Image (cartoon, rainbow, N blue to C red):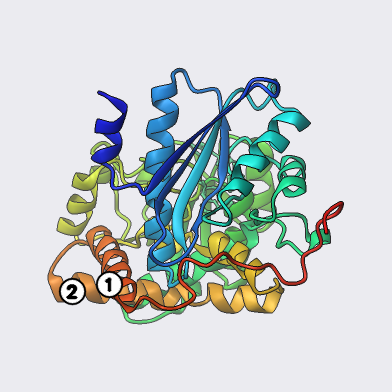
Amino acid sequence: MELFEQIEGTEHEQIIFCNNNEAGLKAIIAIHNTVLGPALGGLRMWPYGTEQEALDDVLRLSRGMTYKAAVSGLNLGGGKSVIIGDPRKDKSEALFRAFGRFIDSLNGRYITAEDVGIDVNDMEFLFQETNNVVGVHQVHGGSGDPSPYTAYGTLQGIKAALQKKFGDQEVGKYSFAVQGAGHVGHNLIRLLRDEGCKVFVTDFNEESVAGAVEMGAEAVGLDEVYDLDCDVFSPCALGAVVNEDTIPRFKFKVIAGAANNQLANDEAGDELDARGILYAPDYAVNAGGLMNVSIEFEGWNRERALRMTRTIYYNLSKIFSIAERDNIPSYKAADRMAEERIEIIGKLKLPHMGKPHRFPGRERHGHA
Ligand code: NAD
């Protein structure tokens, strides 16, 4: 397909191709929608097989960020960026500083953060060239590791789903199957165990499993997890784990976890709905990380971050109400809630819209 033909069909506002020969930089920034505010979304570094793969990824991911921010009540739009390269071999100071210049040239229309293949040291180089990064180190007034907030937000989503499905939020009464005990999964298991829940865990990584078992979780096999007789399935590892092969095996009543893109396709969401399994839409449940970095605009502190993360409960409750109001599955209701907010708030044409964020209390070394 011709490039512009593909872009036309995606509704993106702007796509920037970034090239710097000296630094070996080949990157794409995609700004999907800035109606609610500047586009925020992480930078991914990945050895894409083709440029088309990189473009497809950045277009898909940036659109997802628009929906996540909108449904979470944030004054942010959706964007994302990708660097084509192998994060184990191709990183350099020059690469990130060159890319930082491109981000800076957008004057705050796009704000970046960490994503797959990027670590806090890479963020330091970007931060030298632009203020438009979040998730910088706490020594610069940044918010640090988002995972504990993502996990805490996931717990709020779980509570909303339990309330909808069973009419109470007594988390400790219910049993959980957590798939993936990495950064988010580990923190979530700790929170669930603190509530007294029965927790099953599975992970490729034996150390992660051991850490969860130490907190009182029971280890199960990688495939066995889909057959467990327990109340809530909480995917915290990979996408597409809710699919035509796994759904017929489910005895779960609720699916609520932090992993991105849990549904393999729309049919999987329809099938869950038909079977009466309540699905808490992933991008609303796992927004704690995004909320946490967004606090950096006002000056980050832990209390503010936790307070905002607790709003995930209300966001999920609203999604379930829209699903009931319009008689649609919850995954569609989440999209509808995001689209309605963009449309209604967009029409208000509020004065701060389209203005770049300031970052009070953040120090950038070497810059006035
Ligand atoms: P992570 O890499 O720290 O942890 C993922 C864990 O899943 C690892 O321990 C890995 O061994 C395990 N895993 C991978 N495949 C598995 C499988 N098939 N079965 C069982 N375990 C498997 O990642 P994370 O930061 O904890 O993120 C987890 C998920 O949540 C990802 O989908 C991520 O995109 C999403 N998410 C994370 C954040 C955040 O703040 N970290 C925010 C939003 C969304």
Residue 6 seen from this side? yes
From the viewer's side, name the closer residue of 205 and 312: 312
Lateral position of residue 242 relative to residue 85, left or right: left
Residue at 37% of width from left, 47% of height from top? 262
Q: On screen, 29 above or below 269?
A: above
Tell me residue 317's x, y (percent): 34, 76
Q: Mark 2 sits on what residue?
A: 324
Lateral position of residue 96 relative to residue 366, left or right: left
Q: On screen, 337 above or below 2?
A: below
The three-letter amino acid code for the residue at tag 1 is Phe
Q: In the rendered image, which quarter is residue 298 located in?
A: bottom right
Question: How many numbered marks does the figure carry?
Answer: 2
The three-letter amino acid code for the residue at tag 2 is Glu
Q: In the rendered image, which quarter is residue 195 located in?
A: bottom right
From the viewer's side, name the closer residue of 259 and 295: 295
Decide if ligand 1 comes within 8 Å of the CB at mark 2: no
Tell me residue 47's x, y (percent): 55, 22
Query: Pointer 2 and pointer 1: residues touching (CB < 8 Å)?
Result: yes
Say the numbered circle drawn on residue 186: none
Tell me residue 285's x, y (percent): 44, 63
Q: In which quadrant of the rendered image does the C terminus lie? A: bottom right
